[in-house]
Image: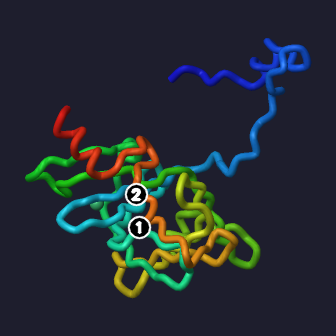
Amino acid sequence: MPKQKKLSDYSARRNSKNSGEPAAKRAKTKTYRGPKFVIQKHAASHLHYDFRIEHDGVLKSWAVPKGPSMNPSDKRLAIVTDDHPMAYATFEGVIPEGNYGAGTVMVWDRGTYKNIKKKDGKRIDMDDCFDHGTIEIFLYGAKLQGAFALIRTQKDNQWLLIKMNDEHADRRRNPVKTENKSALTGRTMVQIKKDARNE
Ligand code: MN
């Protein structure tokens, strides 16, 4: 991968007072350099959303039949599925018939996350969060922003995905219904399927 050009290089070559170009200033975006997360919309035998977060060099994964909700009153079932390789975070396309999970896959949302789980004011590390079955993360996604909890139920492989109360919680917003284009390519599920057929 080519080395990213630094803002200092940009500045060195310009005198913004003379050129009228914007001065070098890092934008205050809501991005965060952290571990990755991805949510893939997957039209397999049953439509679901695969919620994946980077941990220990893999994507820890849950299948969420109803997808994430921005409403803190909703508890969305999240069933543990196989760890996936990091490279899967940008997989978008069609898994052919006869294969496990056959169907169209869209990178519905992607970004980074921050572990925000604390106990007695102390940060709890992610390994312990997994052990305890209580994960609290802040998502910096293209669609989803804000704090989400993943809580393990009595059944080991069944967790609940819940929007935590913060300024990003929104009972009226239903991104799963209204925001249905890829965060990676801007394509719809139909377009992804069509493109795969023409490849
Ligand atoms: Mn899936």
Up the image or down, 142 lies above or below 46; here it is above
Give the residue type that dot 1 points to: Lys
Q: Residue at x 69, y 77 (%)?
A: 119
The answer to which quarter of the image holds residue 113 is bottom right
Q: Looking at the rendered structure, which numbered label has been put on residue 163?
A: none
Q: Nearer the viewer, residue 178 or 138?
A: 178
The 10 Å Cα crowd at callout 2, few under 14, some 14 to 19, many 20 or more, is some
Viewer-nearest residue: 122 or 52: 52
Contact between marks 1 and 2 (CB within 8 A): the answer is: yes
Q: How many marks?
A: 2
The answer to whether residue 180 is above or below residue 7 is: below
Taking the image in four quarters, ligand 1 sits in the one at bottom left
Q: Is residue 132 left or right of residue 62?
A: right
Q: Which residue is mark 2?
A: 180
**Position of residue 85 measured from the top left corner of the image (x, y, whole percent):** 36, 47
Q: Residue furthest top?
A: 13
Place of residue 118 in the rendered image (x, y in percent of width and height, measured from the top left):
68, 72
Mark 1 crowd level (few <14, some 14–19, many ≥20, 10 Å Cα): few
User: Which quadrant of the figure contains the C terminus?
Assistant: top left
Q: Quadrant of residue 91?
A: top left
Q: Residue at x 76, y 45 (%)?
A: 28
Residue pointed to by mark 1: 177
Q: In the image, residue 100 lies at what x, y percent?
A: 16, 56
